[in-house]
Image: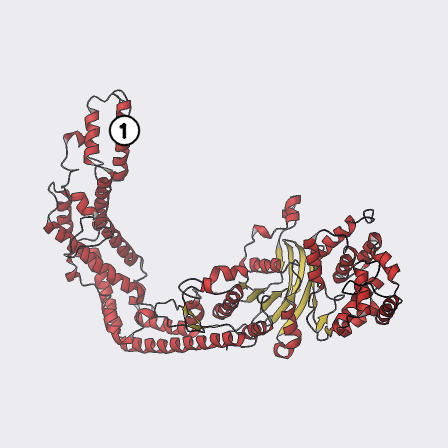
């Protein structure tokens, strides 16, 4: 796929290739636009464009509409999974499980899903009833009925509503709102109905202003006459707590009206409307209604889960589990209404029909249990093999998936089970575990494209290879990204080196590597071919003779001396030159003798194949205008950086920039084989622009 991205963050246009079924490695220094590419591809695949992708420069100019974000060439890619810092932070490492999404990744294999479909087929109507709207509504209504009638504390030991329940609090002095002071007669239509608690609270608040109104009503402003007594009567009869319990009791009656039997509904209404305080027998009657409602709720809850393998996972008591879904209306007579009776009859019939297929169901359950046990055992073995290979002091255990969650436990090599992996694991360990889980998740989701945004740059050689082996070479069995379309974005030369040199035979022909570069908002790539990683000594010797200027040749000459381990006179001469010393010195700061300087210059001349005049070169290096001209003439960002580093050595006060320059100069310095910096851009254009600004600011260069 030849993908073109336009107008995405710092990128005006980017052209990259992605080969299906391969590992596509894109190596580039930080600041090139790797993460922008990742966000662009995700946005294109999802069909939603995030506003933060629009380049700032177009927003500033007010021409964003003229330069719209677009991605072309991503044909056939509808789903993308991305591993990045956000994935590590938001998906993994919760207190109760190492991988909270592990059920879908580890358990819901194609075999598991097939068997689950078979279970649903055998369950037939019974498996569908739990999700039906009328069943869900009945369950929700009965739960609300109980919550408003007896509250959250349930029944007492003698199966009666507790003294703290809404119905007892509302009726402990009888129905005062139906048999009340004549002063309350005008309020009959609202007493105990609607938002009664708010009304009572409003009255109480208004009473506080009665003394300030000078004979006027604090509610309507009209003369009060005897309205003060009426206001007092409301306040005395209905405090906000009592009003709230009255309101809940009436709400319970309203809900139960659709489901209670005629006799239960009539008796409950009589209790609620009685002027006498509620009796113990009446509490017992309400307790029986509450028990009946709870029995129906329990049966419906089991019905809702019956289509799950985990509800049937113990095949030995399968008959009992099916029977627990039945509702015997004769035993819950309080709800012998036409609605509840019809639904109970339908559920009971479906249970009996399913029990006729119990033999087939048991066979499927047992088969599913075998698949699950083998799968979990295999996953533990694979992950622990990787952890041992990478040198991490942990193993994982997956006790089972009976809860439908498949909790993954972290165990230290001391055999201590880690209770909170968030606190125990280091950043690198979290990153490694996240990659393992990500690989399994991709195997489960099967995305069209997998993007790894700098996944393993923080690891040393052994751990880095263990991760590469796990992800791409089958290091944990089938659960890898081998054979998938993968875009690996990295600034880590070690990752590129392992894939293209150290372990190249293992990765070929399934890997293709490129170096990304970005100049003036245009991002392009250069393919890393078989012979592009060159022995450092050979590479720098060639560049020391072929580069365009003597200053740059000496840069490579010093690299030659470093590779050879030759820190003698020639190294001291070139280092002194680059540090602007009028007189060359040894590393211990002692002054070099004339014959030592001559010997060093002769050695350098042999490497660069050109005469070396220390003072003449020093004059060039100390001339900002000449160094700026060399800088602009060079076509390699690496060489530009070296020129700027030498020119500004004695003058720059920007320590952060100097550190960035020094760090970029030594990219890949520890590897025996290197990429040609004149062919591959190994330094970001942003850093080069900063360097040029520094050169321009130096004395003598301002007029350039």
What sort of colour scheme is used for the picture?
secondary structure
Question: In this rendering, would 74 be left or right of 552?
Answer: left
Compare residues 454 and 560 and report the one nearer the observer. 560
- Residue at image location 44% in from the left, 77% down from the top: 378
Q: Which quadrant of the structure image shows residue 94?
A: bottom left
Q: Nearer the viewer, residue 652 or 351?
A: 652
Under tag 1, what secondary structure? loop
Which residue bears the numbered disc 1? 208
Question: What is the quadrant of residue 519 in the picture?
Answer: bottom right
Q: Is residue 653 above or below residue 414?
A: above
| Left or right: where 389 falls relative to 125 | right
Say which residue appears at 19% left-offset and 33% top-offset: 236
As rendered, which of 241 and 579 lies closer to the eye? 579
Q: Nearer the viewer, residue 176 or 79?
A: 176
* Residue 11 spot, x, y in % from top left: 66, 55
* Image quarter of the N terminus: bottom right
| Label 1: how many Cα within 10 Å (few below 14, some 14–19, many 20+) | few
Q: Is residue 522 visible from the viewing direction of this image?
A: no
On the image, the x and y values in percent for residue 608 come to: 84, 69
Counting every numbered tag in the picture gives 1
Q: Position of residue 335 (x, y in %)?
A: 18, 56
Tell me: residue 181, above or below residue 58. Answer: above
Task: Determine if residue 155 is in view.
Answer: yes
Most distant residue in the front direction: 590
Would residue 453 be found to the left or right of residue 201 on screen? right
In the rendering, at what x and y percent does residue 263 appear? 13, 52
């Amino acid at each position: 796929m030849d993908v073109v991205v336009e107008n995405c963050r710092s990128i005006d246009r980017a052209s990259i290739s992605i080969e299906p079924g391969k590992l596509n490695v894109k190596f580039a220094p930080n600041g090139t636009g790797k993460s922008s590419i990742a966000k662009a591809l995700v946005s294109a695949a999802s069909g939603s464009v995030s506003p933060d992708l629009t380049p700032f420069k177009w927003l500033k100019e007010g021409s964003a509409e003229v330069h719209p974000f677009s991605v072309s060439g991503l044909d056939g890619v509808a789903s993308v999974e991305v591993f990045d810092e956000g994935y590590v932070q938001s998906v993994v490492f919760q207190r109760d499980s190492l991988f909270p999404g592990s059920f879908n990744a580890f358990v819901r294999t194609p075999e598991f899903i097939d068997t689950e479909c078979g279970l649903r087929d055998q369950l037939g109507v019974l498996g569908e009833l739990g999700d039906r709207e009328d069943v869900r509504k009945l369950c929700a209504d009965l739960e609300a009925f109980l919550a408003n009638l007896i509250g959250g504390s349930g029944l007492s030991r003698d199966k009666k509503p507790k003294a703290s329940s809404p119905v007892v609090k509302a009726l402990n002095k009888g129905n005062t709102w139906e048999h009340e002071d004549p002063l309350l007669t005008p309020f009959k239509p609202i007493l105990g109905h609607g938002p009664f608690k708010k009304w009572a609270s409003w009255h109480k608040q208004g009473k506080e202003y009665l003394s300030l109104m000078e004979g006027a009503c604090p509610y309507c402003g009209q003369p009060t006459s005897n309205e003060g007594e009426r206001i007092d009567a409301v306040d005395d009869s209905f405090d906000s707590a009592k009003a709230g319990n009255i309101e809940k009791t009436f709400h319970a009656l309203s809900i139960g009206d659709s489901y209670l039997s005629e006799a239960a509904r009539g008796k409950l209404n009589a209790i609620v409307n009685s002027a006498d305080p509620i009796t113990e027998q009446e509490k017992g009657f309400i307790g029986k209604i509450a028990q009946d409602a709870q029995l129906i709720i329990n049966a419906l809850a089991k019905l809702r889960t019956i289509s799950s393998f985990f509800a049937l996972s113990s095949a030995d008591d399968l008959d009992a589990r099916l029977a627990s879904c039945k509702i015997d209306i004769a035993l819950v007579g309080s709800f012998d209404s036409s609605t509840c009776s019809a639904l109970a009859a339908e559920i009971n019939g479906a249970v009996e029909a399913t029990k006729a297929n119990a033999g087939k169901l048991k066979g499927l359950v047992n088969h599913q249990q075998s698949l699950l046990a083998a799968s979990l055992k295999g996953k533990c073995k694979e992950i622990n093999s990787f952890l041992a290979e990478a040198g991490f002091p942990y193993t994982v255990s997956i006790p089972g998936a009976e809860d439908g969650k498949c909790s993954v436990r972290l165990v230290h090599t001391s055999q201590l089970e880690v209770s909170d992996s968030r606190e125990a694991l280091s950043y690198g360990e979290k990153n490694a575990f996240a990659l393992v889980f990500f690989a399994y998740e991709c195997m489960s989701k099967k995305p069209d494209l997998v993007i790894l945004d700098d996944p393993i740059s923080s690891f040393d050689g052994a751990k880095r290879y263990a991760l590469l082996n796990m992800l791409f070479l089958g290091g944990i069995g089938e659960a890898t990204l081998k054979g998938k379309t993968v875009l690996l974005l990295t600034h880590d030369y070690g990752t590129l080196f392992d894939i293209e040199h150290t372990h190249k035979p293992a990765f070929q022909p399934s890997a293709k590597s490129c170096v990304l570069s970005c100049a003036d908002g245009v991002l392009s790539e250069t393919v890393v071919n078989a012979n592009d990683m060159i022995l450092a000594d050979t590479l720098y010797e060639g560049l020391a003779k072929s580069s365009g200027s003597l200053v740059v040749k000496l840069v490579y000459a010093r690299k030659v001396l470093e590779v050879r381990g030759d820190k003698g006179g020639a190294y001291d001469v070139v280092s002194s030159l680059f540090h602007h010393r009028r007189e060359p010195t040894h590393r211990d700061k002692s002054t070099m003798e004339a014959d030592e300087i001559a010997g060093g210059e002769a050695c350098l001349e042999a490497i660069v194949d050109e005469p070396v005049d220390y003072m003449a070169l020093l004059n060039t290096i100390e001339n900002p205008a000449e160094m700026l001209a060399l800088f602009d003439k060079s076509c390699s960002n690496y060489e530009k950086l070296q020129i700027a580093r030498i020119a500004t050595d004695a003058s720059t006060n920007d320590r952060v920039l100097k550190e960035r320059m020094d760090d970029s100069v030594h990219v890949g310095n520890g590897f025996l084989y290197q990429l040609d910096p004149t062919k591959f851009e190994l330094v970001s254009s942003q850093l080069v622009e900063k360097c040029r600004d520094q050169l321009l600011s130096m004395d003598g260069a301002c007029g350039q």
